[in-house]
Image (cartoon, coloured by chain):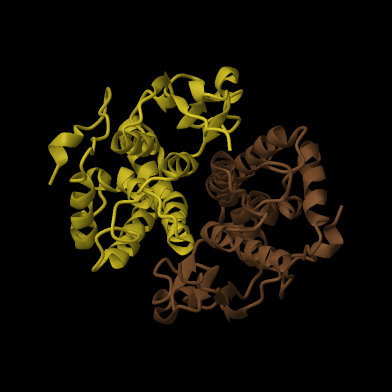
Chain colours: A yellow, B brown
Amino acid sequence: MPPRPRPIRLYESSIPSGNVYKIALLMALLGIRCETATLDVMATPSETRRPAFLSKNPNGRIPLLELDDGSFLAESGAILYYLAQGTAYLPEEALERARVLQWMFFEQYSHEPYIAVMKFWTFWGGLHKKTPQELATLKDRGQSALAVMDKHLEGRDFFVGDGLTIADIALYAYTHTAHLTGFDLGAVPSVRRWLERVRGAPGHVPIAAGPGAPDYDATRE
Amino acid sequence: MPPRPRPIRLYESSIPSGNVYKIALLMALLGIRCETATLDVMATPSETRRPAFLSKNPNGRIPLLELDDGSFLAESGAILYYLAQGTAYLPEEALERARVLQWMFFEQYSHEPYIAVMKFWTFWGGLHKKTPQELATLKDRGQSALAVMDKHLEGRDFFVGDGLTIADIALYAYTHTAHLTGFDLGAVPSVRRWLERVRGAPGHVPIAAGPGAPDYDATRE
């Protein structure tokens, strides 16, 4: 089998993205380094929606990974999976591996669309355009996702098995800043303990701040 | 390594679900049979949100797979992955496998929340409560997802590699009925040809109709 193509460039955004942070955190834990290319997502239109980038990712989203075979890989979950294959962050056993993916799909469907979207509107604009009902829906569904996580983490150190996996990394990215936009981490004590566990992993790096971003470091509990 | 736990029961819904259909289609292609348990999602509260089911899946969603080791696996993408491991529907090679997941994450994040949600509101109620703006957003984003698929499928028979994978199955489920709720499949000719290819796979089964469902068979193009 030929060698696996290596990452040469990570496309990220001009404002801190939890979805990019997932990749940056896993790369830090694995000691993988590559170039970054930053796209101005506050421009009109966003640089992610212009032809130069759409030719790389027709879905117009970051993160996007460029590989040394000239191809690209999109979707944070797929990039995490690619980089984690053959490492301790992705179990080999069939059912454990499926459970890791279960939590990664949960994150993209039941967690990120509420918690990440609330963060975007709060810090990068547009919150004032939302109706009270829209905000209540985001708040309720995001808090419900945290409750599902809390229930699962009762008596567990990590989401799957005994160690940190890409399921934890995927869920950590937007959970660890959720209290900044009104989600109640006090109501989910097992989540809080798990956040400390992920934060304490050797090689952990914090999310980048960036211009206009909240001071994440100041919010450590 | 101990034998992999086997599926014994698939939890599905009283109205046809594309997410359940993905599993049913893969099981048909693989010749896997198991019991089904049907939950009344139109009851108040939905049977998926009652304690008996929440004890099996705290996220309160179908499909859910029960295994013969007494455990459960949630999320259609994770169930597809679990069942497809070791079969032709999931490539072994690292990058190909990640590309399959890329399209499955795309489906859950950029496709299903628009195309499946429009279907739910249209056929199972609630469409009249939506504002014109909400409906336009669903329509635009769903149609954009179809355009991204169309672009990728130009000159390709399947989403990844040369054969049918769980990426195709995941995307087929809600795409093949999208024209019933106003999405324009005429605008995406490569998608239409791919739909025929998936429909023609040996062992293919159609989505179940169910009470109140549109007559899917009558809508074949």
Q: Is residue A198 above or below residue A189?
A: above
Quadrant hosting residue A211: top left
Total labels: the figure holds: 0
Residue in the image at 45% along x and 58% along y:
A102
Given residues B98 and B175, the one toward you in this image is B98
Residue in the image at 80% along x and 56% along y:
B199
Given residues A44 and B28, the one toward you in this image is B28
Q: Is residue A127 visible?
A: no
**Residue B160 in picture, x, y percent from top left:** 66, 42
Given residues B159 and B130, the one toward you in this image is B159
Q: Is residue B194 above or below residue B60?
A: above
**Residue B176 in picture, x, y percent from top left:** 74, 53
Residue in the image at 79% along x and 64% along y:
B203
Q: Is residue B37 left or right of residue A90?
A: right
Give the quadrant of the N terminus of chain B.
bottom left
Q: Is residue B111 left or right of residue A132?
A: right
**Residue B201 in picture, x, y percent from top left:** 80, 56
Given residues B218 and B42, the one toward you in this image is B218
**Residue B80 in picture, x, y percent from top left:** 58, 60
